[in-house]
Image (cartoon, grey):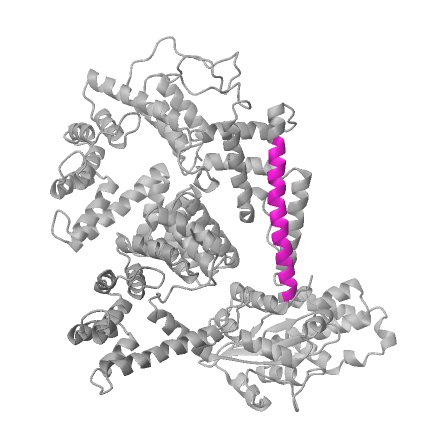
Amino acid sequence: MPRIIFKCPYIKPEQKDAPAQRQRYVRYIATREGVERIDPGKAILPATDKQQKMVRQLLRDFPSCEELFEYSDYLASPTRGNASEFITRALEDNCDQLSSRDGYVNYIAKRPRAERSGTHGLFSDGDGAVSLPQVAETVAGHPGNVWLPIISLRREDAARLGYDNAKQWKELLTSLASQMAEAMKIPNSQFRWYAAFHDESHHPHIHMVCWSADGRSGFLNKSGIASIKSALAKEIFRQDLTEIYRQQTQRRDELTQESHDVLRQLIEQMKDGTLENPNIERLMLELSERLRNVKGKKQYGYLQAPLKSIVDAVVDELAKDQRIAGAYEQWYLLKEDALRTYKDHLPDRVPLSKQETFRRIRNLVVEEAVRLGEDSAVLSPLDSPEPHEATSDMPPPADDPPDAPAPEPEEESPPTVAWSTRYKEAQLFLYGSADTPPDFEEAYRLFLEEAADGNALAMYDLGRIFSDGIGRNADPEQAQVWYAKALAAFLAVEQQRPNRCAEYRIGKIYAAGIGTEQDHEAAAEWLTRSAEQNYAYAQYSLAKLYSEGKGVPQNHKTALHLYEQSAAKGFPYAAWELGKLYRDGVGCRPDEKQSARYFATAFRGFKVLESQSHDDKAQYRIGWMLLHGVGVPKDEAAARSWFKKSAQRGNKNARYQLAKLILGDSVSTPEEIAQAVEWLTQAAEDGSQHAQYALGKLYRDGESVESDRVQAVIWFSEAAGQGHEYAMYALGKLNLEVGNVEAALRWFRKASELGNQFAQYQLGKLLLSGEGVPKDVNEAVRWLATSANQGNQYAQYLLGKLYLLGKDIPQDREAAVRWFTLAAEQGNEYAQYFLDHMNDRQGPPLLTSATRLLHHMSRIFQEELPPVQPGIHFVESKLRRKIMEKRLALGHRADDHEDQPISTIAMR
């Protein structure tokens, strides 16, 4: 596979002369017999002792030399010729540490085999002649860092692809200069570079000198180097990579189909009783049984973690099949071939079940498990139609064999509410501690023993274990059974003797509708009994009911009073709510000092709560407060740490926030970005609409992932299905791009009704134009006004034009001036142009003609833009500004990005 080598040393302004040892290298390169003059007959002889010693010394002082093509050639054949090539190249690549800056510029310009234009070989992006003394003087006196990139190819690749001359390299570097500047954190207007092409016998290469004209900008890390190397490789080896990507896609499709065929064969064998893989049979039967209790979409992304683990286990078993293993190996070889083009170290391989490219295989497993569950012949021993006794009051099936059932108490223990020693141990194993990791199996065993002794608290916790799938597969039916038992036990305890804890739990059960029908009035009654006995948890829960008007008349003052009572007893969630109420003036007057005091109290309380339970929700809340500086000084690094703790415990909100922080950090490494995309995908699959929208944007814009409009539509649709207005707006824009106006209108209308000002503007424009939809001027003006009243400058500008021209609505210069003024105050240049020329004799027609010319100019620029290759996003800076002006005038946000059209089929 072709490969590119890219190195980028730099010279600091304070760098001193190299030590004496490296001065010897300079004398050696100045006096040694040049490689170009070696007798061809001697070049194939074994390397001399002096050469071997120099090679070893270079490797000790400059370990990165091991990556050079010349060193690979020397290892394969340690001849005098290859040794000379390596020594020359190693000294050349590390010349920044061996000589002064002006000397370096002279060296790369004048050394043997530098392709020259006149007396030297320096070139840059201009057409004029380059003055070597002037460049050398500038570099020597520059107050900031100077980078010295070196780009090398093998001779055969350079000749085959046309990169064996300075002209081709100049065109390439000129086209990628903007990307290099961005990777080096240098403003494009301040980026300066020069280069020289060295036509070495085995490995032609380019030497560059780069710096920032302002002497201040510039920072190049590993991520930036990887970005430059990737851009170079994707442009130089474009044809090679295109074929690899085509083969890789073909292999992916073949592997997916192969997995499907193998799975169908195994299921047929299960039906015939001939399956020789008991693991797959057991896993598929368990999965199909569990999926019976799943409500909603039965797709991998919507399943809870325990069910996902079963699907993953099935995929891992399938991956052991020779056919699938071979196909996966071939796919990975192609993937790594592409990566080797611009990566020095390949990432570790991941199992098939964790490979996001093959998510379709996981969904195929789910589909087959659902189909399996519908076939009663397969599961006849478990789904026997014969009548049997109800088992709703039986404990969960034991793991013991049938002839050794778990013992049951001879008579039922009386109900109780007790924080016994055993119950506390169960809680410790459930949550873990600083010294003790969670042990869900031990917690479950202890809770069962406590429940058998009548402890209602343990019954309630067992309900939560089955409901949330903590340490075992989620089982909603079993959860309801245990919640119902807990409710009955709490009621029995209350009948024996009033108990504020039992009253609180009864109220919570009725409020949530678990183990019984939801009844907010009954919940309020029971919570009131407990709250009147000063139980902090009940006071907080009752306050929520008063705040939302559920089961009781809505009363914010009563809610405020109850929150204050609960917070006074140290309950942090109540303090949090009080911080919001005093901040917003709900049930009280706004009071910033009181709000800040309660937020600070809440933060301290969450820290205490987390130290006791290691709860992921408390960890997320702590991270959120640190990130936003609420109740505590802002500390993004600490916030990220807390989000990571919570994310590792499965909190989807923490995963979303953690991903946002990493993706928004300009110094994040490629590995961190890949992990962030994984966090975001997990959050999206767990149902976070914000993560779904963010993931849709990544796929739409091709940021941090390969652009995939189909994936973008899928995730936008998921988020829109949960009421995410910006996802609806994004779907409207995507449909509008491909001419699916009816679908665009539908999504814009949905988002507009939720108050999205951008969708309101687009909806108004569509209805006003009547292109592809019935024209409705009155509704159009209504939506434009709604958007404009929310501060949308584009709607304000368009309304100003409508009132000025009086074409579809009565002319109203006063209204036109008002809307133009509002838009101009936000920087809208077109609105300001109208305001400046309102009294021109030519009047509105000339003004609109002038603005139309500006729009047409932007469109021509955009249409004439050459196609962008995958991974290359270069646009000349002035053109970029023109395009941005055009986009802003059309109503797009400045931070939003357009892409290539997508098939309308994927959006319906």
With respect to residue 181, does 303 lie above or below? above
- Asked if residue 382 is among those painted magenta in the image, a careful observer would answer no
Residue range in magenta is 239-266
Q: Is residue 178 visible?
A: yes
Residue 816 appears left or right of 24: left
679 relative to 328 in the view: left or right: left
Q: Position of residue 816 (x, y in %)?
A: 20, 74
Q: Quadrant of the N terminus?
A: bottom right
Q: Is residue 411 above or below residue 513?
A: above
**Residue drawn at (63%, 29%) of the image:** 277
The answer to whether residue 187 of the structure is visible from this angle is no
Q: Residue furthest front?
A: 774
Kindly indicate the quadrant of the structure image that contains residue 340: bottom right
Choose top left, top right, bottom left or bottom right for residue 247: bottom right
User: Against 481, is 81 above or below?
Assistant: below
Residue at horizontal 24 percent and vertical 86 percent from the top = 842
Q: Residue furthest right?
A: 41
Please give left or right for residue 144 compared with residue 44 in the image.
left
Indicate yes or no whether the magenta region holds residue 240. Answer: yes
Place of residue 139 in the rendered image (x, y in percent of width and height, measured from the top left): 54, 83
Main secondary-structure element of the magenta-colored stretch: helix
Q: How far across and down, in percent of the image, does residue 908 sit?
A: 42, 51
Tell which of 294 and 111 is nearer to you: 294
Q: How many marks?
A: 0
Q: Residue at x 65, y 81 (%)?
A: 166
Position of residue 545 measured from the top left corner of the image (x, y, whole percent): 19, 37
